[in-house]
Image (spheres, helix red, strand yellow):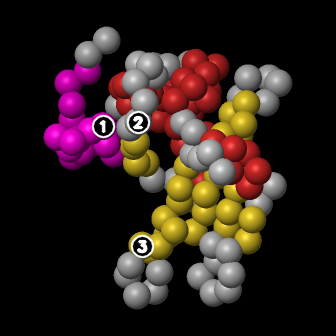
Amino acid sequence: MFRPEPPRSRRDTPGGLRREVRGAEVVDLLAALNTGHEGGCGTLHANSALDVPARVEALALAGGMGRDAAHSQLASAVDVVVHLARDRDGLRRLRQVAVPVRRPDGLVVMESALDLPAAGEPVPGPAAPRLAERIGR
C-alpha cells in the first residue's frame, strides 16, 4: 500500500535506499528492505542498538502492522544495527554494533556484537562471532 510521505519523515538519496523513519513510515521502510534486493539502510531514533526492536514495533503498530508481522519483517530486513551517540563535543560516534536474533516465539532481540565506550577499548559482545560471519570474516 502506498502512503503519502509526510514532510521531514524520511530522507532518500539518489544513490540508493537510505531512509530516516520517525513514525508509521517504518512499514514502508521494512517493505522496501524486504524486496529481495541486496543493500539499503535506514535510520531511526532509539536509545541503543538493543532497543531497536521495541522502537520498530511501536512505530509499526502506529502504521497498522501487527507485532508479529513487524518482528518478522525486521528479522528478514536487518543484518546489522549500528548505534551512534552524540559525545560532549557534539560529534556522533559509533557506540554499539548489534545483530538481530529471532527468538523461538518469533520476536526479534538484538544481541551486542561490539560495544565502544567513550573511553577505553572496544569490547566484543556475545554476538561478535555472528557479526563476523555476517560480514564474511
Residue density around tag 3, few if under 14, some if 14–19, many if 20 or more, within 10 Å: few
Give the mark nearest the N terminus, 1 or 2.
1
Rendered view: 124 above or below 25: below
Query: What amino acid is at disc 3?
Result: Arg
Task: Name the residue beneath numbered marker 2.
Answer: 39
Residue 39, how many percent across, how many down?
41, 36
Q: Marks 1 and 2: CB-CB under 8 Å?
A: yes
Q: Name the side, left or right, on which 118 lies relative to 44.
A: right
Residue 4 placement (x, y as % from top left): 20, 24
Q: Position of residue 71 (x, y in %)?
A: 61, 27
Label 2 neighbour load within 10 Å: few <14, some 14-19, many 20+: few
Q: CA distance from mark 1 to mark 2?
A: 8 Å
Rounded to the nearest angstrom, the CA distance separating label 1 from label 3 is 22 Å
Question: Which of label 3 and label 2 is nearer to you?
Answer: 2
Q: In the rendered structure, which disc, 1 or 3, sits on the residue that comes first in sequence?
A: 1
Q: Which residue is mark 3?
A: 92
**Disc 2 residue type?**
Gly
Q: Is residue 77 visible?
A: yes
Quarter of the figure that contains the N terminus: top left
Q: Which residues are magenta?
A: 3-24
